[in-house]
């Protein structure tokens, strides 16, 4: 995955990695990796970013089913 893609996801609020205060490098934890993997799965299904944002904000399975 490209650096630009990760930054794009971050700008869209889909991932929020911690940043090292000294060098400003991003540090992705296991939850970030899971989120990125899930986002990539949705993108492979050709779901647009706006819809992915809605899915990630949805808290119930019923709402998720309606969005998909």
Image (cartoon, rainbow, N blue to C red):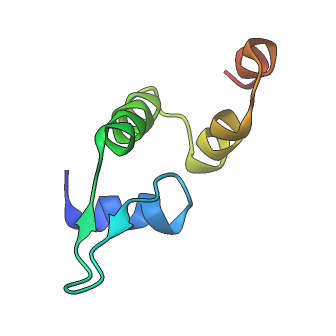
Residue 17 vs residue 55, the one in the foreground: 17
Residue 34, how many percent across, how many down?
36, 33
Residue 10, how many percent across, how many down?
45, 63
Residue 52, how many percent across, how many down?
59, 40
Question: On the picture, is 13 further left or further right than 54?
Answer: left
Give the residue drawn at x 45%, y 26%: 45
Q: Quick one: which residue is furthest to the front in this view? A: 21
When asked about the image quadrant of residue 13, the answer is bottom right
Give the residue drawn at x 39%, y 38%: 31
28 vs 61: above or below: below
| Quadrant in the picture for the C terminus | top right
Give the residue drawn at x 73%, y 25%: 67
Give the residue drawn at x 52%, y 52%: 14
Disc tally is 0
Residue 18 vs residue 64, the one in the foreground: 18
19 vs 35: above or below: below
């Amino acid at each position: 995955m490209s650096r630009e893609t990760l930054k794009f996801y971050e700008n869209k609020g889909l991932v929020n990695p911690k940043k090292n205060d000294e060098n400003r490098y991003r540090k992705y934890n296991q939850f970030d990796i899971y989120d990125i993997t899930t986002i990539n799965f949705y993108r492979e299904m050709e779901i647009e970013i706006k819809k992915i944002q809605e899915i990630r904000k949805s808290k119930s399975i019923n709402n998720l089913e309606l969005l998909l």
